[in-house]
Amino acid sequence: MDLNQFIRIVPDFPKPGISFKDITPLLLDPQARDYCLQQLVEPLKDLQATKVVGVESRGFFFGMAIAQELDLGFIPVRKPGKLPYKTASQIYDLEYGTDTIEIHSDAIVPGDRVIMHDDVLATGGTAAAACTLIESLGGEVMACSFLMELSFLDGAAKLQGHKSYSVLRY
């Protein structure tokens, strides 16, 4: 199955010159969604992971499904102020400025083997920050999983030796 036919390209969104990759058509099609999930899960099956981290917000869709498929716990990583309990945070660089992500401070314990999932690997800043958060709580990042990789942005270089898997590459 060619999953590219389920990715809608939206020109000039969110700003001129950007070609946004919209996954809504993929989410709407049960067979394409299931096929995509199987492609995401296949390289992760033998990692003996204990948890999956999904990065806000589109990383939640398949992150939770990966956790369900592998019978693992799921941990949301969110923007500041969205989690209701004690959190650990990580600041990371953007093209112009910084951003922050947070995780519940008790969600990962030393020895956890974690799969980090997000929808898109672009410049790698968010993914690298999520990996740093996982490791700061004592977890080991077993793999970074992405639905799509924008390889021309070389975000994988920021993942500092972590295994990285993407179903689609642009």
Image (cartoon, helix red, strand yellow):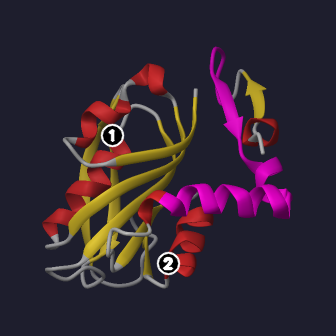
Q: Quadrant of the C terminus?
A: top right
Left-right relation of 162 to 116: left
Provide residue 16's location: percent of width, then percent of height: 66, 16
Specify whether residue 31 is in view. yes
Residue 54's mark? none
Which is nearer the eye, 164 or 116? Answer: 164
Q: Quadrant of the N terminus?
A: top right
Q: Is residue 131 above or below residue 83?
A: above
Badge 2 element: helix
Label 2: which residue? 70
Q: Residue at x 23, y 62 (%)?
A: 133
Label 1: which residue? 125
Q: Residue at x 20, y 71 (%)?
A: 139
Q: Which SS does the magenta portion mostly show?
A: helix
Q: How many residues crowd around disc 2 within 10 Å: few (fewer than 14), some, or many (20 or more)? A: some
Specify whether residue 56 is in view. no
Left-right relation of 162 to 137: right
